[in-house]
Image (cartoon, rainbow, N blue to C red):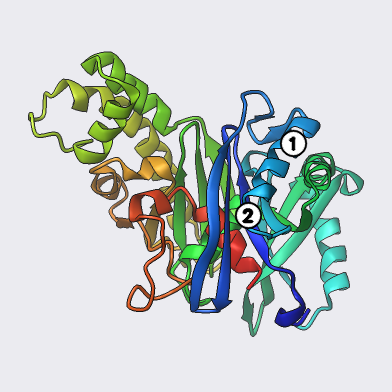
Amino acid sequence: MPRILKPPAAGIDISDTSIKWLALEGQPGVMRVRTYGEEELSPGIVVAGLVHDVPKLGAALAEVKKKMGGVTAAHAALPEEAAYVFNMHVPDGSARDQILNLIEFELQGRVPIAPSAAVYDFNTIVKHEEQGEEIGVVVFPRELAESYVAAFDAAGLQLLSLEVEARSIARAVSGVHDEPITLLVDFGRARTGLAVLKGGVPIFTSTVAVGGDAMTHAVMDVLKVSEEDARAFNNDQGLLPTEGARSPGLEALTGAASALADEVARLYHYWDTRRDEHGARATPVEQVYLVGGASNLRGLDDYIAGRVQASTLQPDMWRNVCSFDDYIPPIDRRTSFQYGTAIGLALRGV
């Protein structure tokens, strides 16, 4: 569709605890934030990404719609917990219908869902002269997707697309297709999403039950402080406290940080050491990106970098939105890591 005919759309990120939204305006590369915000979500409406109460989620989305400044369309993300993600090759020049038929045939050996009970799509990663076109495939249970569609319908929001969260974040932080293979770590409050990105397209995702809340509560218990003070401790001192190596706060954080680092290192080394039929490294991982609100834990980047021996950093979430020389977004840097999915979804519509 020509860009001028597209309705203005917000990126809407639904988690178990909140709904974040963000809409952009302007031309690619020189965009501005039109509207953004966060609405708390009552416990039990969405659990581990699964919608347990469609009417209540619809009602919450209707409240969000009232605050979006006239934006009535949306791009949304589906939870990685329910996704099946893989890469495959198809003949170069294949039509979309042909590729979808090839994917359906491939599902039988890769995904424990019947094709009739699944929804799936693909993104092109790269075209090889000998191997054809490499694509990244994402598969979801149809019932899950339909529950999100029903909630948006109930809210009176026009849902334009659904995609996996990792693809949304990758759109915000990745550059051109020659971007190095990246391990994306989305460190949230209740869980951490891990994804391997190739050319900015996920080829693998997984989720681990390690989140920032566990670290916050550990600090609260040990230091006898409020949740707000515990979060401030994590962000300001974290794994590099001023009281030395035996600081009670550091000891409280180390267990959860170590569990997360173990998962990152395990996944990193598996993908980094894979070999193709010629014995060459198939997916050499060159960098680790840390996003999500809990990624602000001070010292976490160095802690993980020491485990994987690779560049580990928090990327610029506005990389594909604007230049700071021209515009400073209204969301500060620390908070922007919570909006990665919403920013990437909003970019889909420009």
The answer to which image quadrant residue 133 occupies is bottom right
Foreground: 294 or 304? 294
Q: Amino acid at mark 1?
A: Ala
**Residue 59, labelled with which disc?**
1
Instruction: Answer with left or right where residue 111 lies relative to residue 237.
Output: right
Report if residue 232 is visible in the image.
yes
Secondary structure beneath label 1 = helix
Horizontal side, residue 88 vs residue 331: left or right:
right
Q: Is residue 78 visible?
A: no
Query: Badge 2, how many Cα within 10 Å: few under 14, some, many 20+?
Result: some
The quarter of the displayed image where residue 44 is located: top right
Position above or below: 85 against 294: below
Q: Amino acid at mark 2?
A: Met
Q: Residue at x 62, y 49 (%)?
A: 67
| Residue bearing the label numbered 2 | 68
Where does the image place residue 35, in percent across and percent down from the top left? 55, 58
At 50% from the left and 46% from the top, the residue drawn is 194
Q: Earlier in the sequence, mark 1 or mark 2?
A: 1
149 or 279, nearer to the observer? 149
Quadrant (top left, top right, bottom left, bottom right) of the C terminus: bottom right
Residue 72: horizontal and vertical position, in percent? 73, 58
Residue at 84% from the left image edge and 78% from the top image edge: 95
Q: How many tags in the picture? A: 2
In the image, is 163 to the left or to the right of 296?
right
